[in-house]
Amino acid sequence: MAQDKKIIRRQIQLSFWKSVGMAWQSIRVRLFRSILVVSGIVLALAFLTYVLSSDALFRAIALGASPELKAELERQGVLTNFAANDATIQSRWMAGLALMISFVGILNAMLMSVTERFQEIGTMKCLGALDSLIVRLFLLESVFIGAVGTTFGVLIGLILATVEAWANYGSAAWWTMPWIKILQIIGFCYLIGVVLTVGGASYPAWRAARMQPVVALRSEI
Amino acid sequence: MSESDVEPKAQGPEPEANNAELQDALQSTEVVRAVGVTRTYHLGGQPVHALGGVDFSVRRGEYVSIMGPSGSGKSTLFNMIGGLDKPNTGQVFIDEVDIAALDTFELAWLRCHKIGYIFQTFNLIPVQSALENVMLPMLFGGMPETDARDKAVELLTRVGLKDRLLNKPAQLSGGQQQRVAVARALANDPAIVLADEPTGNLDLKTGEEIIHILESLVRDDNVTVISATHDHKMLAASDRVVYLTDGKIVDIKHRDELKITAGTIRGGREE
């Protein structure tokens, strides 16, 4: 009996790499929509990375600055602000907001892409696809989209923050560069980016997978 | 339950003698059996009795058409047989296995290996080529990709689409799409092919070609074909026609009782 169950499971299994291929294919075919979703993530992540890393860069410059630069910063009043932490709180708010907006955007885009494929999902279920396979296909798709979007977003955010620091404080931006902190920020932003996309995709994917094939087939858009 | 566990074994290697015996036993059994099946839907709070106690059975290698006006419960019955829907009361047996007793894995296995579906709207995966569409059920069934490809080419050749392997569904005519769907339905050598109005979206000639392919499956490969239809051409090819009205079977006609209609249409095609 247990043996037979195993045979049954083996006979309804699509290989992981094949499903990666299918997910990739469906992104490629819907290139325009995919680019829209990706750009939403790029914007959100670029903003988040920018806010976090420019903050880190500024702290490093303030700590390691030469006496002349410190005096200059003092005169501009930025060091006082820095102490009061105003700018940081404000920008964290902004980053949080950007994240929320892109989460809703991603959820909406993934919902749409699932809804327009109800018939396809119904057909696949008729052909013997397991619920878990449907979920896997949609999640893989979102992981691709999330990874690409996050990579570009983080890159753009970092470049912007560095260029801005360099423009304001000159070469100090380079020799005080807090590499470890920057790496931590990159890691954090990657985590956020991927969690955001996979989180946004998991509800529609779960809904799609649980549909009765009949209902999925009958649905018209 | 025990029978459901026998089936996967039948796919694998088995002693020849046993296999022949098993084949004999299976030949004589009914491949689909519905017992007192009822199904009620709720539409806007109102109960709709789509099926009110249907009993019927289909033998292996039989071509059965289910006929009835829309709203007669035809599609509901069809979905029950296909394991796409479960009855409220009564039972549906496929190869003597009660489908209500199957878990998700077994149900997916059944849809993958036992049943081939053909739909009125073709339902091909739009982003995949004809070849990939036909390969899909085999890949779901765990067949290695190269084997699946070879078999898909063979099946598409059989339905006359040898030159269209890499075309996407949108680049194919309705008749060609339905042929791809037929090839896909045959991918895992199913015991039953379920066709829901397979000629509904096709013109007369292409419809006849599809019917002809289905007929050859029954005659040459001993596949059981069950189709829900409005199409009188389809009846001519059937061994048996089940008439459904208001969720109940009102008449069952055998091939010989359908002779006059059958003769006319058959004659037409052979000319």
Image (spheres, grey):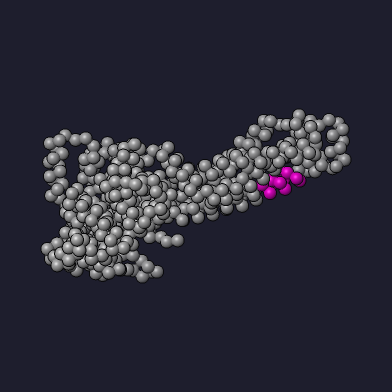
Res A220 seen here: yes
- Queried whether the magenta region covers residue A89, the answer comes back as yes
Q: Which quarter of the rendered picture does the C terminus of chain A lie within?
A: bottom left
Could you say which is closer to the camera, residue B189 or residue B113? B189
Horizontal and vertical percent for residue B234? 23, 62
- Residue that protrudes farthest toward the front in the picture: B271
Q: Which residues are magenta?
A: A86-95
- Answer left or right for B140 relative to B237: right
Answer with left or right where residue B173 lies relative to residue A38. Answer: left
Pick whichever, A73 or B201, lies toward us. B201
Check residue A132 for magenta coloring. no
Nearest the eye: A95 or A147: A147
> In terms of depth relative to the viewer, which is nearer, B46 or B178?
B178
Question: Which residue is pictured at 74% across the width and 38% down the height?
Answer: A163
Question: Which residue lies at the image location 38% right of the left edge and 54% below the top edge?
Answer: B172
- Residue at figure coordinates x 69%, y 38% from the top left: A159
